[in-house]
Image (cartoon, rainbow, N blue to C red):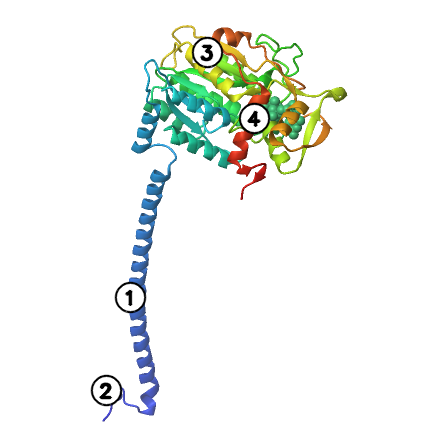
Amino acid sequence: MPSMEEALFPSTPGKFKIDRQYNMWNRQFHRCFASTSTMFLWALFLIALTASYLSFQSFVDSGSRYFSASWGGIQWEKQVRNSAQIHRSGGISVLVTGAAGFVGTHVSLALKKRGDGVVGIDNFNNYYDPSLKKARKQLLNNHNIFIVDGDINDFKMLSKLFDTVAFTHVMHLAAQAGVRYAMENPQSYVHSNIAGLVNLLEVCKSANPQPAVVWASSSSVYGLNTDVPFSESDRTDQPASLYAATKKAGEEITHTYNHIYGLSITGLRFFTVYGPWGRPDMAYFSFTRNILQGKPITVYRGKNRVDLARDFTYIDDIVKGCLGSLDTAGKSTGSGGKKRGPASYRIFNLGNTSPVTVPNLVNILERHLKVKAKRNYVDMPGNGDVPFTHANITLARKELGYKPTTDLQTGLKKFVRWYLQYYGYSHGKPVN
Ligand SMILES: O=C(O)[C@H]1O[C@H](OP(=O)(O)OP(=O)(O)OC[C@H]2O[C@@H](n3ccc(=O)[nH]c3=O)[C@H](O)[C@@H]2O)[C@H](O)[C@@H](O)[C@H]1O
């Protein structure tokens, strides 16, 4: 029996070609038609898949933006408000910039301890080991102080903070520190110490009410001044480093905001602050690390082999000076960016009034660490260092009740105890 195909297309040789061709065309047509529709279906499927992927992705993106944003949102505002809450009568609410920094951490803790409201900001940059900054943040969190992960150049973030809390004071400590690093990365000083400062002041001047601003200037503004001890009225127009120049610029910038907008300003010239939770880039800290690791330290010497000296000031004394400044700061007079009357503009030295030479600093460390340092004496390179600092603190004593009580011997003992514990040393040896 012929098959259906054979019946329809008889296999005669003459017709075979035609029939065969027709057959093939027909089959191609069917196959083609079938594959086109399949392709069409596949295309539809792929379009749908892509569309759903994209919409899912944008959902995930917007969701993750919302959830991972370092600031903003209902929960964030709640944390900011809680942290800013005042728990004593006559207390203040303070925005502390650079709160995960050395001085910022200590000032924040002291304010919180006495019942003031504190909210911190820090950008956790990697100028030095950020894990130390994170550890300080943890310490602050343990004391119910909320730290915003943000930069003082972020106008929106700062404005949002002032929309959320009517801060009475700003303790501005965020800065690019370090005298010698300014030759390596000059732009970072302009970014933080100039642009960041102006941005912060812009927000402060527009806030309603305006906060009183207390901020960290530096002993380095005295630069090449040779009158000792350094008094606030001495020359500060001969900076020896870009760091010093940006701090001096900060004093002038804050003056204009005081003059034009009625912001209350207090600038504090810190003298080589040291202590527990300190800055690893500073000499006393890096010397300690190297001495313990058996590595040599470089001790700079001035002209004619004269020892360099610093008016090293212990952190607890500095904290008292900061709190005294906040407590005595006059109110800002402006509102909504308009000045309503003159506001106070003050500058104070916060030093220890008893300079110690760098070799003597090393002697004290050797005694506390019970390890001899391998010293390399090197002529002071022309890198922005000044030969000595020495503070006259008469003004701060009179106006702030500032009275430093910790000498270098005592202060370094406390630092060394903290260092050994924090970095896991026991009897001068690292604990695994
Ligand atoms: O009062 C300030 O306004 C500044 O204080 C601090 O600057 P300085 O007084 O320069 O402190 P720091 O670096 O500890 O050097 C101390 C001494 O050790 C010498 N020094 C340093 C390093 C080294 O390897 N060898 C050395 O001899 C060095 O030559 C110097 O004589 C802050 O860092 C700065 O941010 C700012 O706050």
**Callout 1 secondary element:** helix
C-alpha span from label 1 to label 3: 76 Å
Q: Earlier in the sequence, mark 1 or mark 4?
A: 1
Residue 329 shows in this picture: no
Residue at the spot 52% in from the left edge and 22% down from the top edge: 315
Residue at the spot 32% in from the left edge and 77% down from the top edge: 25
Question: Are the residues tagged 4 and 3 within 8 Å (C-beta)?
Answer: no
Amino acid tagged 1: Ser
For disc 1, the marked residue is 37
Q: Nearer the viewer, mark 1 or mark 4?
A: 4
Front in this rendered view, residue 66 or 229: 229
**Callout 4 secondary element:** helix
Residue 311 shows in this picture: yes
Q: Position of residue 31 (x, y in %)?
A: 31, 73
C-alpha span from label 2 to label 3: 103 Å
Give residue 295's quadrant in the image: top right
For disc 4, the marked residue is 413
Residue at the spot 70% in from the left edge and 31% down from the top edge: 375
**Callout 2 secondary element:** helix
**Badge 3 density bin: few <14, some 14–19, many ≥20, Cα 10 Å:** many
Q: Earlier in the sequence, mark 2 or mark 3?
A: 2
Q: Position of residue 328 (x, y in %)?
A: 43, 10
Amino acid tagged 3: Asn
Q: Which mark is residue 258?
A: 3
**Badge 2 density bin: few <14, some 14–19, many ≥20, Cα 10 Å:** few
Q: Does residue 87 lie above or below 230 as drawn? A: below
Image quarter hosting the N terminus = bottom left
